[in-house]
Image (cartoon, grey):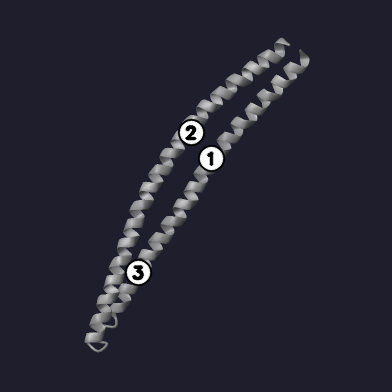
Amino acid sequence: MMGTVNELLDLMFKWMDQKEGCAMHLRKLARELEDLREKCNSNQFIGNSVQVAGAASLVGAGVVTLLTGGLAVAFLAFGATYIGVGVTISVVTHLTEHLLSSMTMEKAQRIESESNKIAERIQASVRAAEEGV
């Protein structure tokens, strides 16, 4: 009986330590996600700005090409290139954010899973102690 009580106390202290560690890790992960979101927002802004500049260049080059009878057709490539670069930045930003946030969430789920295992062991010890009484 005393062995079961000691085991139960050890498990409870281990569970409390695990929960404190879990809270610390989750706060850290939340800060990481917040930093990631800020970086992705700034990269998204850059990508969108490049796309807008590309679209404006494309329209301007198109107008100049029409007015000059096709002499400025080479400038259309610059606008298209800007649009392509902007789209690439935006897509890479979304993929990076998704990948890194997924990895962060997996860490949080792993931490929670470890805590749940300890809680299950505590419940099993309690049931064993109740059956032994």
Disc 1 vs disc 2: Cβ atoms closer than 8 Å? Answer: yes
Describe the element under mark 1 as helix, strand or loop.
Answer: helix
How far from the left and from the top, in percent, is residue 44?
36, 56
Separation (CA) of disc 1 from disc 3: 36 Å
Question: Would you name the residue on which mark 3 appears?
Answer: 83
- The residue type indicated by label 3 comes to Ile
How far from the left and from the top, in percent, is residue 79?
31, 73
In the rendered view, would you say 76 is above or below 92? below
3 or 2: tag closer to the N-terminus: 2
Question: Would you name the residue on which mark 2 appears?
Answer: 25
Label 2 Cα crowd, 10 Å radius (few <14 / some 14-19 / many 20+): some
Question: Would you name the residue on which mark 1 appears?
Answer: 107
Placement of the N terminus among the 4 image quadrants: top right
Label 3 Cα crowd, 10 Å radius (few <14 / some 14-19 / many 20+): many
1 or 3: tag closer to the N-terminus: 3
Q: Quadrant of residue 106?
A: top right
- The residue type indicated by label 2 comes to His
